Amino acid sequence: MKKVAFILALAGILFSCSKKVAPTLPPAPPNLEIQEIDFEYFHGKARMVFNDNKKEREVKAHIRIRKDSVIWMTFTVIGVQGGRALINKDSITIVSTVDKEYYVFDYASLSKRFNVEVSYQTIQSAFLGNLIVPRQENDQITQGTDYNLLHQERGPVSLTNFINPTTKKLEKVEMKESSTNNAIAVNYSNFQPVGDKIYPFNGMINILYRTAGGVVNTSITLEYNKAEVGDKELKFPFNIPRKYDRR
């Protein structure tokens, strides 16, 4: 679970790109339509595979989201609960029930440590297959046969979003930081109806991240077997036993 905690935190860090996000965004360019998932509550079950080129770990995850508020997850390995996570607007908390320890990552310290902005909103968008970074008026659009491209520059980070011109869905995001060459690619596939929208039941995240100890090359695969959105209120039970150690 230590490796899982690190990967989840790293993925959240690399998903976030802009240190300054205006509270009121200008209107998006009208000539590129993107269909995004809107909801009050989301509930999904997925198979998740973590691979750091040294070891592969597979877990089954239950995921619940309350819009713009909280992301809740539990993990099981071969029928035994291995951990849980709670992501809210203030922090990321990951509990390992196997090691009897937990981790708390606050966005401010993570942003300072890695020199990129960590935000709840971008993590939520990545889970749902929505745009990871909100559109702005100066974003550039390139229209093509296979994909329409939305190019975004946010400080040292460049993003290219690949939009299917038929379904209007985001199918791929490529991000690169110019100063470090850190890179992340997100691919979405197997789109199926969820409510009145279509949702990617398969996702692949590839991370290339340089640290003091060398290059980290990590992949995260998600395969949903269930995904629902609606107005029905969900519960988000979460507690940390007193005997657990904070790491």
Image (cartoon, helix red, strand yellow):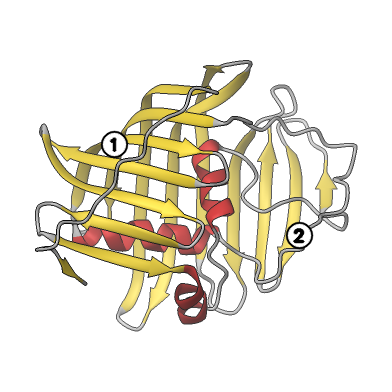
Task: Provide the secondary structure element on which disc 1 rests.
Answer: strand
Q: Is residue 26 left or right of residue 160?
A: right
- Identity, as a three-letter code, of the amino acid under mark 2: Pro
- Residue 211, position as x, y percentages in the image: 37, 78
Query: Does residue 4 show up?
Result: no
Q: Name the residue beneath numbered marker 2.
A: 23
Residue 105 disc label:
none
Residue hosting label 1: 61
Q: Do labels 2 and 1 touch, CB within 8 Å?
A: no
Q: Residues within 10 Å of mark 1 (few under 14, many from 20)?
A: many
Q: Position of residue 41 (x, y in %)?
A: 51, 30
Give the class, few, some or many, for how many residues have Cα within 10 Å of label 2's Cα (few <14, many ≥20).
few
Q: Nearer the viewer, mark 2 or mark 1?
A: 2
Residue 234 screen position, x and y as percent? 42, 30
Front residue of 95/111: it is 95
| Residue 222 vs residue 218, the one in the foreground | 222
Q: Is residue 35 above or below residue 105?
A: above
Q: Residue at x 43, y 42 (%)?
A: 204
Which residue is rendered at x = 59% and y = 42% of the image? 172
The residue lying at 83 percent from left, 53 percent from top is 140
Q: Is residue 231 visible?
A: yes
Q: Disc 1 residue type?
A: Ala
Of the pair 6 and 108, the residue shown nearer to us: 108
**What residue appears at the point 66 percent right and 53 percent down from the top-left corner?**
133
